[in-house]
C-alpha cells in the first residue's frame, strides 16, 4: 500500500539528517514548513517549554506547573495549545524571556530551505504562527492561510499547493478556507489511508494515491 513520508516544523535536520536518508533509500517526502525562522533563529512555544523543563526552570510565574513528574509536560502543552491565539503567544513570549534568545541553530534558514527544495522533495505550508486553526474566527483563518506563504514560495521558487494543519487538527470550515486560499491538498493527523470519496483538503497523513479497498 503506497504511503507518504512527511515532516513538519522547520528543522535544520530536515536537510542534514532526513534528506540524506531519503536519498539513500530512493524515497521522497513532503516537508511542511512555517517559514518562521527563514531570517533568524526561532523556536516554537513547545520547544521553549521543553527547554525550560529540561533546564529545571521555575514556570510558576507563568502559571505553568510541571513538577517532579516530567510526563506532566504533556498536559501543560495541551493546555497551552488550546489557549486563544493571543494568550498562547503571550506564553511563548514569556517562555522566551525566561530562557533568553533562541539558540542560533534553531529553525530553518532561507538558504537551508532553498537547498532542501532543490532536492527531489515537495515543500508544503504549515502556517506561520502554528495556531490551532479550529479555534480561529473566519477572518483569522483567512489570515493564517496567507501569512508567510509568499515568503516561502519566494525561497523555494514554486507555489505551495499542500498544507499540513497545525497539531493535525482541521474541520470542514478549515478545509473550506484552505480551498479558498488555493491549496489542492490538506492533511490532518489522522492515521488512515485515503478513500476515493474523501475531501482532498481533509486528508490523513497518507499518500493521496493510496486507496481503501
Image (cartoon, helix red, strand yellow):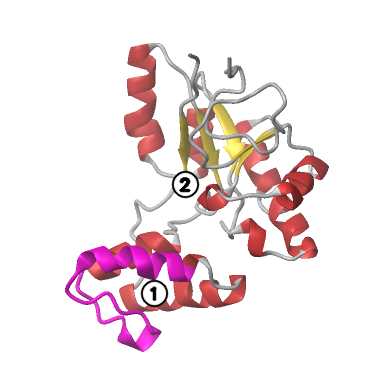
Q: Could you tell me how far apart the alpha carbons at marks 1 and 2 are, in whole angstroms?
A: 18 Å
Q: Which mark is residue 95?
A: 1
Q: Is residue 184 visible?
A: yes
Q: Is residue 102 visible?
A: no
Residue extending furthest right? 180
Compare residues 97 and 161 and report the one nearer the observer: 161
Element type where label 1 sits in the image = helix
Image-based side of 104 in relation to 56, left or right: right
Image-based side of 139 in relation to 133, left or right: right
Image-based side of 149 in relation to 61, left or right: right
Mark 1 and mark 2 lie on one chain; the one further toward the N terminus is 2
The quadrant of the picture occupied by the C terminus is: top right
At label 1, counting other C-alpha atoms closer than 10 Å, the crowd grade (few under 14, some 14-19, many 20 or more) is many
Q: Which mark is residue 9?
A: 2
Residue extending furthest bottom? 61
Residue 117 percent across, percent down from the top left: 54, 28
Residue 125 percent across, percent down from the top left: 61, 42
Residue extending furthest top? 26
What's the residue at 69%, 64% (across, down)?
Answer: 136
Q: Image quadrant of residue 138?
A: bottom right
What's the residue at 33%, 14% (across, down)?
Answer: 24
Q: Which residues are magenta?
A: 55-80
Query: Does residue 194 sit above or below 54 in this rendering?
Result: above
What's the residue at 42%, 59% (across, down)?
Answer: 43
Residue extending furthest front? 213
Q: Image quadrant of residue 78?
A: bottom left
Element type where label 2 sits in the image = loop
Residue 3 percent across, percent down from the top left: 49, 21
Whether residue 190 is in magenta: the answer is no
What's the residue at 73%, 47% (across, down)?
Answer: 172
Amino acid at each position: 500500500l503506497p504511503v507518504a513520508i512527511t515532516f513538519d516544523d522547520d528543522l535544520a535536520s530536515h536537510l542534514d539528517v532526513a534528506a540524506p536518508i531519503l536519498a539513500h533509500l530512493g524515497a521522497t517526502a513532503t516537508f511542511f514548513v512555517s517559514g518562521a525562522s527563514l531570517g533568524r533563529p526561532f523556536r516554537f512555544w513547545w520547544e521553549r517549554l521543553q527547554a525550560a523543563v529540561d533546564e529545571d526552570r521555575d514556570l510558576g510565574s507563568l502559571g505553568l506547573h510541571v513538577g517532579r513528574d516530567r510526563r506532566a509536560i504533556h498536559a501543560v502543552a495541551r493546555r497551552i495549545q488550546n489557549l486563544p491565539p493571543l494568550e498562547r503567544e503571550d506564553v511563548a513570549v514569556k517562555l522566551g524571556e525566561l530562557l533568553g534568545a533562541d539558540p542560533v541553530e534553531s529553525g530553518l534558514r532561507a538558504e537551508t530551505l532553498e537547498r532542501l527544495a532543490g532536492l527531489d522533495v515537495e515543500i508544503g505550508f504549515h502556517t506561520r504562527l502554528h495556531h490551532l486553526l479550529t479555534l480561529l474566527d473566519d477572518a483569522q483563518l483567512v489570515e493564517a492561510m496567507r501569512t508567510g506563504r509568499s515568503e516561502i514560495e519566494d525561497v523555494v521558487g514554486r507555489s505551495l499547493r499542500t498544507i499540513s494543519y497545525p497539531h493535525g487538527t482541521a474541520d470542514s470550515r478549515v478545509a473550506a478556507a484552505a480551498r479558498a486560499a488555493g491549496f489542492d491538498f490538506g492533511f490532518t493527523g489522522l492515521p488512515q489511508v485515503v478513500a476515493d470519496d474523501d475531501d482532498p483538503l481533509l486528508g490523513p497523513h497518507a499518500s493521496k494515491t493510496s486507496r481503501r479497498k
